Every structure is written in structure tokens, then in C-alpha cells.
Image: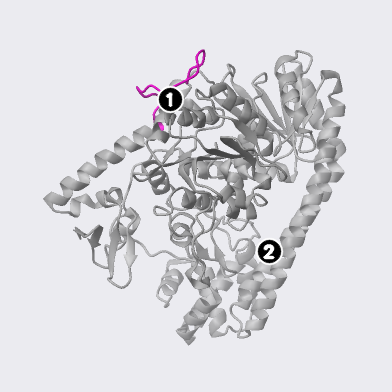
Amino acid sequence: MTLEKRDRRYIAISTYEERAVPKAAGFHWDRSAKVWYTDDAGIASRLAQYAGPELIEELAGAARARVAKRNASRAADVDVDIPVPNGLAYLPFQRAGIAFCLAHEATLVGDAPGLGKTIEAIGVINGDVSIRRVLVVCPATLRLNWRRELERWLVRTLTVGIASTTAWPETDVVIVNWDICEKLRDRLRDETWDLAVLDEHHLAKNPKAKRTQATLGVEANKRKGQEADNGIRARRKLAMSGTPIVNRPAEAFPVLHWLDAEAWPRFWPYAMRYCDAHNSGYGWDVSGASNLDELQEKLRVGTARFGMVRRLKTDVLTELPAKRRQVIVTPANGAQAAVDAETRAWWAHEETVTAMRAQVELAKAGEDEGTYEAAVARLRDATRVAFTEMSIQRHETALAKAPAVVAHVLDALETTGKVVLFAHHHDVIAALRDGLAEYGPVVLTGETEMADRQAAVDRFQADPACRVFIGSITAAGVGITLTASSHVVFAELDWVPGNVTQAEDRTHRIGQRESVLVQHVVLDGSLDARMAQTLVEKQDVLDRALDRETEWELPALPAPAASGSTSRGRVAQLAERMTDEGRVIVHEALRTIAGMCDGARAIDGHGFNKIDAAVGKSLAEAATLTNRQSALGLIVVRKYSRQLGPEMAAALAGLTG
């Protein structure tokens, strides 16, 4: 293998056997030139050992620059002077964050919740005297907080106003909430702002949502003849969120494209690299995650005009205690009927959906395209019905669980000063409020008037008689400070880990001096009890993408072949090469595994699992197999080949695939 530089591109010239090395390093394949290439010197430096002396020196310089940029994106302090009002002071890490933003035209500010990103944004205004016109887009619940912080922290006299659908303020700084951006699209685009700040930018994660298109725009679509719309125009751009990737890497692309369309030009190359994009047989699935270490590197190092600054509390606030998380499983007792109903509904729907998925898989081996399409349609309908009905069942379980949650909080209040309690549904929140009435609870939900929201927070923070704060996860989960408590209880779960983290961090913020205890109260056997571990696993994926430092490791040569999703067309291709002997081998392997199958729902070394069980057993029970059925069976049994004897496993490995 050799590494060369041609014009602005770094070219890796490799043999077919070596192809996994440049691919793993982040190079792209140029089909026309038949070479691996990258425009990124940092990526090229991973293959520096294959370059000549002059190119090695160039790459070494680029590597040093990347290290400096990476360190700056994590810096806890920096020796710069940034104007600040008399009597106030930036914390050291805030000063470093402001300096990072001032060094770039576009910055993704991903500091952990509670570190004061609002103050950092205002520090950018203070540090750049050319900024006169500022647009702030934020959640409705934070409009007053933004105005208050601007009036407190600005060192220059800039007027501040809040926009509505009926009135646009003629002020230097205009604050707009996300909910009305679609209606104010033209006003947002009327000028090129000196600074545009998108607070809680994850609210614009869906590229098809009108609020996203009104603020971030959309990428060009040559196939549809659609030109690029670069969204709100600004000389400087800040996109801020404590959870920049809420649920999956695909959700970060719209804001990255808005920040720097040259660095992040098109979604599909991004999806193929970082979202584990693959054809699931029902269409393209971009909900996964891949190459997360590389994604974090690219975000932190960025470009000359773009970068991400992200610091964790453990990195910059060593005096701030860590959070402790617990899942509190309580007996169902009086809620047993609701849990049983939820469980029955869950299993019934899962069995139905599993059967539908198996029908889709078996239809891949059929000759009739209409049968396959009908199976896919039935699966979609069954999934939609299951989701709707399970939402109803979970609501009923949450209502039945309310007394158990109240009892748990009452016990907690015996040993702790104040408790913050989160839930979803208004009737659940009402039940919690009534059960805890003797402790003077305040409530903040989407129905709470704007003027009353800050009053509720202030009372909880200052009034010793108010010992419980009850809020909905969405309305009270961002932008407010509840450091009077170090104990958070979730009465209901949110499937999105970013929302849970945001809600937790209402207490885990600057000013908190105690270790924060976060508890999820779940009923034994309930769906929430099963969801808890999945939430933790999802949060781990996000941590890998944003916070973990890892070393690059390239695979050994030659790289093993990777198996991907199998479409109906692929089954047909395999069937064309299936022989009579192959059909016999596959059928025997299917019957062998089916004979030891114990019905497990996960791979456990004993037969098929879940959907594979339905598909594998159906094929095993057939008198004979067609070529298509044999091709489908081959794909299935290879997943379980370790359960077969060495002779049969070798025979399977010898079949064309």
C-alpha cells in the first residue's frame, strides 16, 4: 500500500486484500478512479506509514494542529480577557468556551447540561464588538430566561425583545421560540444576522419538520431538481444543546449542515458512514450508529470555520458530585391488574408483529411480488396498531403506579430535604400532586402559564415549605434550575435518553453541592422495567459518539467479509446459483437446528431465536425446498452454524453465497 497526494486529495493505493485498511481509516472509494481517497489530512495521517518523507512531514504538522484543536474543544480554562459586567465573572471553562466560539464562524456548543451555555453565548456577543444584530431561537419556556440573562450579562447597551406571531420587536436582539418559527420564516430570513443562536437545537432534528426547514433549511436534491436552502443566514452561528445527539447520529445532520454545509454537504454519505445505513428489506434504515469514534474526532477537530466545544461536568467542575442512578422495582400490588393487562397486550402484539415479520421473510423466497408487498403492508399496519395500543396501556399502568410512586417519595422525604418528580401525563401528575399535597408541591407542565413557570421554580428553590417539584419531562426538562434538591424521581420513563438526561440535569447544575440521586420507580413485570436497561444502552451509544477518547485501531489483513441486510432481490440472486446438492445440505441444516430449538427469544446456542425460529422451522418442515427457499434458508442457518457439526458447517461454508 502507498499513500500519495494528488492536488488536494490524499490517495491510498491498495490491493484488493488491503481494502479494509483505508476504509477503516475513513477513506472513501472513488468508483471511477478506483482508488481510496480523502480530503482530510487527519484521516490521511492514520496511514502515514505508507507515505513518502515529504508527505509524512506535512501529515505530522496536520496531526499537531488536530491535537491542539481537540484539546481546545475540551479546555477547562484559557488565558484570554473577555469583557464582563462589573460584579460578574465567567467561570474558567466558560471563558475557554467563549474563546473557542470566537475562533470559529460556526460552533456546535455541546457542553453538558448545567454548565452555562447561555452565558457562553452572551460572552461571544461581549467578545465581538461587531455583533449588533442577534437572533436567538429557543424553547418557549426559556424566552424569559434568555431576556433576563442578556440584560444581566451584556456589557453593551443592546435592546432585547421577544417575537410573537402578531408582533416582531424592533430590537437589536430578537428572541423567537421554536414553535412559531414556521410562521415567522420570512422574518427570520429577511437579513443576515451578525449572530444566530439556536438553543436546544435538538428540537430541529427532523429534516422533514417545518420548524427544521424554517431554521436550518434543507440540502440540495439534484434528483428532484431542488436547490439547497441554507436556512437562517448569519455571520456567526452557534448551535447549543447539552445533548447534541438526542437519540441517534442521523438526528445531528440537519444542524451540522446548517453550521457548515461544505464540511457536511450531503446526508447519505454521512448516513452510510455514521448511521449504519443499510437496506433492511423494508427500505433504508438510518437509525443506527457506526464509526462513532471517527464522528467525535471530526466534530471536535472540525474545520477552519467550524468546530464543536463539549466539556463534561466531571472534566471542568471537579467539585460537582457525580450522579447516581437507580432503578427501583416495586411490587405491583394494587396495580397488578394493569401490569397484567399491559403484559398481555405486549406479548400479544409482539407475537403478532413477530409472525408478520416472519411472513415478510418467507415471502422473500416466493415468486409473487404482490405477496411480498402485501406482507410488508400487514407488518406496517400491525406495528402501528401495537404502538398506539401500548401507549394506552402504559398510560393506564402509570396511573395505577401513582400510589406506589407517592409512597416512595414520602419515604424519601423522611431522609432528604426536597425531591424533584418527573412524569408525562397530566392525570398522572395530578395524582402525584394530590398524594403529596402535605409537602406543598409546585407543578410545571405544558399547561402552566408562562408567567407562573418561573414563580414555581423560584418557590421550590427558596421556600422551605415547598419540598416537592412535579414537572412533565418535556416542559420542565430543559432550561430551569432545581438545585435546591439532589434527589430526582421519575414516575414515568421517556424512550429518548437525551430527554431523561436533560431532566436529570435540572438538579445537577452549577450550585449543586451534593451527589445527585436519580431513581426510576417501576413496577415489577411492567414494560417500564424492561425499558430501563435499553435506555442505559442507548445512552452508552451517545457517550461513545460525544465523550469517549479512543485510539484508532485498523483491522488485520485481510479483513473478514461483512454480512449485510438481505433483500428479496438478493435472495433471488442466490437462488440462481443454488444446486440440488445445496438444497439438500441447507434443508438438513435447517432440520438439525430446528430439532434442538427451545423457543428462546435471543441467541443462546440452542436452536433458532425469535423471527428466525418461525422462518427456520417453516422451511425445515417443508417436504422439499425450492431454490429461493433454499437461498433464504442458507442465509438463516449460517447465523447458527456453530450449532452444527464440523462436517455440516464445512458443507454450508462451501455453498455459493
- Quick one: label 2 or label 1, which is nearer the N terminus? 1
- Highlighted range, magenta: 74-90
Q: Which residue is mark 1?
A: 95
Q: Is residue 203 at all visible to an observer of this figure?
A: yes
Rendering coords of residue 579 (x, y %): 46, 85
Dividing the picture into quarters, in which one does residue 66 lie? Answer: top left
Q: Residue at x 45, y 37 (%)?
A: 547
Residue 49: percent from left, percent from top: 19, 50
Coordinates of residue 491 in the picture (x, y in percent):
75, 35
Residue type marked 1: Arg
In which quadrant is the C terminus drawn?
bottom left
What residue is shown at x 70% (from left), y 67% (from top)? 380
- Seen in the picture, residue 618 relative to 163 is either above or below; the reply is below
Name the quadrant containing residue 596.
Answer: bottom right
Q: Is residue 554 magenta?
A: no
Q: Callout 1: few (<14), some (14-19), or many (20+) C-alpha neighbours within 10 Å?
A: many
Which residue in the rendered view is the most extreme toward the left? 53
Chief secondary structure of the magenta portion:
loop
Q: Residue 612 location, x and y as percent?
A: 60, 66
Question: Element under label 1?
Answer: helix
Considering every residue shown, the one lying at the far front of the view is: 170
Residue sitting nearer the eye, 577 or 239: 239
Going by the numbered disc 2, the residue's amino acid type is Thr
For image coordinates 16% across by 45% down, the residue present is 57
| Label 2 CA crowd tier, 10 Å (few <14, some 14–19, many 20+) | many
Any mark on residue 354, and which? 2
**Image quadrant for the N terminus?**
bottom left
* Distance from the alpha carbon under mark 2 to that under mark 1: 54 Å
- Provide the secondary structure element on which disc 2 rests: helix
325 relative position to 468: left or right: left
